[in-house]
Image (cartoon, rainbow, N blue to C red):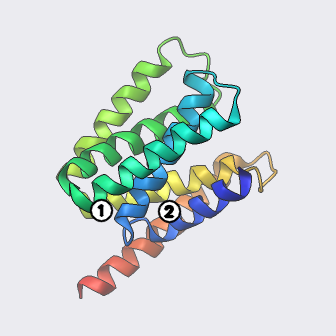
Amino acid sequence: MNIFSLLAGLILLFMGRKFFWLFVGLVGFASGFYTAQYVFAFNNLLVTLILSIGLGLLGALMAIFVQRIAVFFSGFMAGWYFTRSFLIFAGLSALPFLWLVALAGGIIGAVLLSMAFDYALIVLSAAVGALAIIHSNFLLTDSNIFIFIVLFFIGLIFQIRIFRTKKA
């Protein structure tokens, strides 16, 4: 799974805005994967993959056919995934209401993506992409927060430049 997480992270980090349907699919997959492992505590890789692929396909199909719902769905899933992963990453996994804070992050992500689609998509895809790269464990270091921040800003700047160039 590490190579998939790395590739998905790189795609989201640099091309999340350009390939919205892929962003929705990858966010659905990543959310399903971490939900299956940490929320439902499935130890069976096959069950985890089926749930993850199912959510990823659902998200990608929604992005293609029902874009308005997909925007809300992907914003929620990205906000939830980012909030939950970042809290765990920051050592707050024992927070009693972690699921409630992650739910609030999901709602905020959905509202942001609905209101300011282009720039919110760039921010969310860069953040989720950077986290996916960190989760891939290819960067074995104690400076994960620093690496996350650097990756996030590299992805953010790269995507904003592509978006502004395309707009002009």
Kind of residue at badge 2: Leu
Nearer the viewer's eye, disc 1 or disc 2? 2
Please give left or right for residue 71 compared with residue 40 in the image: left
Is residue 86 visible to us here? no
Give the residue displayed 32% in from the left and 86% down from the top: 165
Residue to which mark 2 is pinned: 12
Give the residue displayed 52% in from the left and 11% down from the top: 96
Find residue 58 and report its horizontal and vertical position in percent: 37, 47
SS assignment at label 2: helix
Asked whether 111 or 31 is in front, the reply is 31
Find residue 106 and report its horizontal and vertical position in percent: 35, 35
The image quadrant of residue 46 is top right
Residue to which mark 1 is pinned: 119
Q: How crowded is mark 1: few (under 14 residues within 10 Å), some or many (20 or more)?
A: some
SS assignment at label 1: helix
Asked whether 149 or 65 is in front, the reply is 65
Kind of residue at badge 1: Tyr
Give the residue displayed 43% in from the left and 51% down from the top: 57
Asked whether 128 or 49 is in front, the reply is 49
Find residue 71 and report its horizontal and vertical position in percent: 26, 51
The tally of labels here is 2
Above or below residue 22? Residue 128 is above
Q: In which quarter of the image is the C terminus?
A: bottom left
Q: Are marks 1 and 2 in contact (CB under 8 Å)?
A: no
Give the residue displayed 27% in from the left and 42% down from the top: 110
Please give left or right for residue 152 compared with residue 25 in the image: right
Find residue 163 and report its horizontal and vertical position in percent: 33, 77
Q: How crowded is mark 2: few (under 14 residues within 10 Å), some or many (20 or more)?
A: many
Q: How far apart are marks 1 and 2 (CA)?
A: 14 Å
